[in-house]
Amino acid sequence: MEEIKQYWFVIRELTGREIKRKYARSYLGILWSVLSPLLYMLIMSLVFSTMFKGSILNFPLYYLTGFLFWNLYAQISDSVMTVLVDNRSLLLRVKVPKNVFILSRCYTALVNFLYSLVAFLPLLFLMGIKPSITMLLLPIDMMLCVMFGLGIGYILSVLYVFFADIRYLYSVMLTLLMYLSAIFYPIDEVPAAMQLVINTNPVYCYMRFAREIMINATFPSAGLWAKVILWAVSAYLLGYLIFKRRENEIMQVI
C-alpha cells in the first residue's frame, strides 16, 4: 500500500507537470479544455448543421459528444506513444516502474476530458435534453474508451522506441480514423460498405454508446455493449502484454 501511495503521488506530480507545460504561456490555462470543444462545436455547427439539418437532430450535441470521445482516445494514444523517450533521463535515474509514466499521460488526458464535461453537461440541459437514468452509464463508456486508448498507447510506446517514424505514420492513421468515426456526419448517409467499416471502428462505438445514453436516452444494444467491452479488454491486455515483454529491451535502447 505504501508503494501504491508513492506511485500515485508520482503520477499526480507528472500529470501536474504535463498540464503546466501544455498551458505554460496561456492566460486561460486549463480553461481551454472547456472552451476548445465549445469553439469546435460552434465552427462545425455553422459549417455542417444546414447540410445535415434533416438527418441529425441536435447537431451541436451530436458533434460535441463524438468530438469529446475522439479527443479522449487521440490524446491518450498519441501522448503515451512518446512518453518513454520523452522521460528518458528520469527513467534512467529514478527507480519507479515505467508504467507510472504511461499512466501519468493517460491520467492527464482523462483530467482534460473531465474538464470538458464541465461545458458539455450543462449544454445538454440548455438544449432541451432531459436527465435520464441512462446518463449514469457515461463513466462506464469513458473508462472503456480509456482502456482501449491505453492499450493502443502501450503498443505505440514500444514501437516508438525502436521505430521513431511511427509517430508520423500514426498521425496519418489518426486522421483516417477520425473521418471513419462519423463525428460530424450521419452514418446512414454513406454507402453500406462504408457503414460496415465505420461500425467496426472501435472509436465510433464509444461515440455511438455516448450519443445513445446522453442524447437519445436509450440503453445501448447487447451488440454495442459487446463491442465496447471486447475492444477495451482485448486492446488493453494485448498492449500491456507487449509492453511487459519488451520492457527490458526498451531500457537497453533508450
Image (cartoon, grey):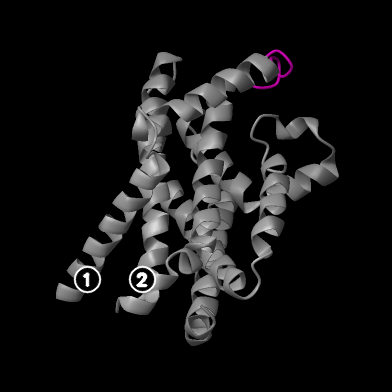
Residue 4 bears which disc, if any? 1
Q: Nearer the viewer, mark 1 or mark 2?
A: 2
Residue shown at 44% from the left, 15% from the top: 128
Q: Which residues are the magenta region?
A: 50-56
Give how far across and how far down residue 136 sits, in percent.
36, 39
- How many marks the image carries: the answer is 2
Residue shown at 44% from the left, 71% from the top: 88
Task: Give SS at disc 1.
Answer: helix
- Crowding around mark 2 (Cα neighbors within 10 Å: few <14, some 14 to 19, many 20+) is some
Q: Is residue 27 left or right of residue 218?
A: left
Determine the image quadrant of residue 132. top left
Task: Give SS at disc 2.
Answer: helix
On the question of residue 195 being in view, the answer is yes
Tell me the CA gap for discs 1 and 2: 19 Å
Q: Which residue is mark 2?
A: 90
Q: Is residue 141 left or right of residue 198?
A: left
Tag 2: amino acid: Leu
Give how far across and how far down residue 185 sits, in percent.
70, 29
Most common secondary structure along the magenta stretch? loop
Q: Is residue 94 above or below residue 77?
A: below
Viewer-side residue, 219 vs 191: 191
Residue 59 highlighted magenta (yes or no): no
Earlier residue among tags 1 and 2: 1
Give how far across and how far down residue 194 sits, in percent.
81, 44
Residue 15 bears which disc, if any? none
Tag 1: amino acid: Ile
